[in-house]
Amino acid sequence: MSGAILEMKNISKNFGSVIALKNVNLEVYPGEIRGLIGENGSGKSTISSIAAGMQKATVGEMFFKGKSWEPTSMIDALQHGIGMVVQESGTIGGVTVAENIFLAELGQFKNRLGLINKRQMNAKATEAMKAIGVDYVTGDMPMVSLDFQTRKLVEIAKVIMKNPEILVIDETSTALSQDGRLLMYKLIKKLRDDGKAVIFISHDLEEIMEVCDTLTVLRDGNLIRTFKKEDFDADAIRTSMIGRELEGDYYRSDFIPSSQQETALEAKNLCCGEQLKDVSVTLKKGEIVGVGGLSSCGMHALGKAMFGALALESGNVLTGEGEAITTPHMAIEKKIGYVSKDRDVESLCLSASIKDNIAIAGMEQFAVGGHLITNANEKKYVRKQIQDLSIKCSDENQLTGQLSGGNKQKVVFGKWIGCGSEILILDCPTRGVDIGVKQAMYQLMIQLKKEGRAILLISEELPELLGMSDRILIMKDGQISHEFMRSENLTDADVIGYMI
Ligand SMILES: Nc1ncnc2c1ncn2[C@@H]1O[C@H](COP(=O)(O)OP(=O)(O)OP(=O)(O)O)[C@@H](O)[C@H]1O
């Protein structure tokens, strides 16, 4: 035993012909925050989920606290000291916060008659939320009433409550806004200071360098290198991630706001409870309008509303020609595309193939006469998106649910880009996407802008908003609190003040 709390030896994992991990050796030490970074599909989720009992390695062995480690499930792993917060939603929608937190452990609340003491269970769940610093969520709340960020926080509370020896956090930052991230950093630093270990997966190099003590780079299922804090160097890490230096512009290189005169889409006086309070936005052709704020500020609701997917109390969404958009069907007809933040639930059908997910919005492009679908045309259309966005998959028939997180996001992007959307409502479009692909997506957005397409870019990444937008709208408490024009001098600090 090397002093490591977890030793993973010669781990390989195959999914049919896909090799996700090749002979990976990973050791994690107590009192360490270990970062895992790598391109989409490099094997980060696979290696950490094997440690956390979600799946088994094809080959290899593991030792936890010096003993052979063969967890039979995530619950088994959590009960014995390794807990994981997964990349996508790890909670169940149809039940309460307490039922999610105590899933598989409801027995402890049974009374002598075998009935569950809900009051006690709810109180304990409320306590667990308070323990991580969230005082606005109680155990009796239905999960469906919570936004994406809060559902993630429930998941974090559930794992933290078990006081794990090792906590794995898989690409969760991008599900959280600024306040949620700060809360998460505080929790993981406390665990580290208490002598526990954390495995932290993120695509945000700046964040991972700031938060982690050591950093392991994976590429194509191989462990490339582990950096110690004193050796952290952004260029060296990037190069070992992608196997070459990243060249060319990342964000826009111009700093002058620009657009055409014509309006592409307009939201007028939108009202929807606490989420939207008299919000008006005009999006011009050839313009990228950024929308930022804290998770509950109303920006995600605004995106939904502009796609006709939110029941409004009043106000309306109109195209440049003055036609009202009240349903997603109408929006699609008017060439509006929408990437939801809640990718797995709202943007994809995970049990369908990549082909079906991409082709569904683009029939007009490849069907003969707009209605006769030929296999060859459909395949050609889908393959082009797979190639343009470098979607890592076995072929277009692979089920979307089998893709890595970032590759799923690329499928969503491909669906709306391929069908020639004139207006794109992009809610956190680069969530979980690696830097190489992010760069390609930004360059694509610039190209679309040049072609006169309009983009509403809703994002929790301030550098992305500052780097890409012609105008930035900051939202707070369901209202637009400030508008900034694109400028070289605009900084994170200028913007944050209007969010909180
Ligand atoms: N259930 C599955 N069936 C088939 N292939 C899978 C499955 N799960 C993962 N893979 C493949 O294994 C490889 C590694 O995936 P993994 O999710 O570990 O990548 P990752 O580094 O976490 O990527 P991302 O940054 O996009 O989340 C990918 O090629 C992925 O498509």
Image (cartoon, grey):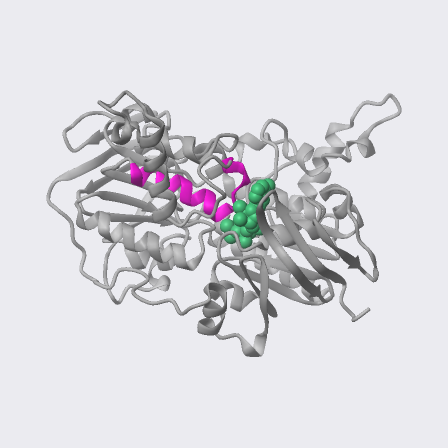
Q: Position of residue 462 (x, y in %)?
A: 38, 57
Q: Nearer the viewer, residue 424 or 51?
A: 51
Q: Is 132 rendered above or below residue 27?
A: above
Residue at the extreme left: 261
Q: Position of residue 211 (x, y in %)?
A: 56, 65
Q: Is residue 336 magenta?
A: no
Q: Is 329 rendered above or below residue 478?
A: above
In which quadrant is the N terminus drawn? bottom right
Q: In this rendering, would 149 be left or right of 495?
A: right
Number of marks present in the image shown: 0
Give the quarter of the image for residue 10. Answer: bottom right
Q: Please report the residue visible at 47 percent of the width from the left and 33 percent of the height from the top.
A: 353
The span picked out in magenta is 399-418
Give the quarter of the image for residue 123. Answer: top right
Q: Nearer the viewer, residue 103 or 2?
A: 2
Residue 324 visible in the current orientation: yes
Q: Nearer the viewer, residue 297 or 165?
A: 165
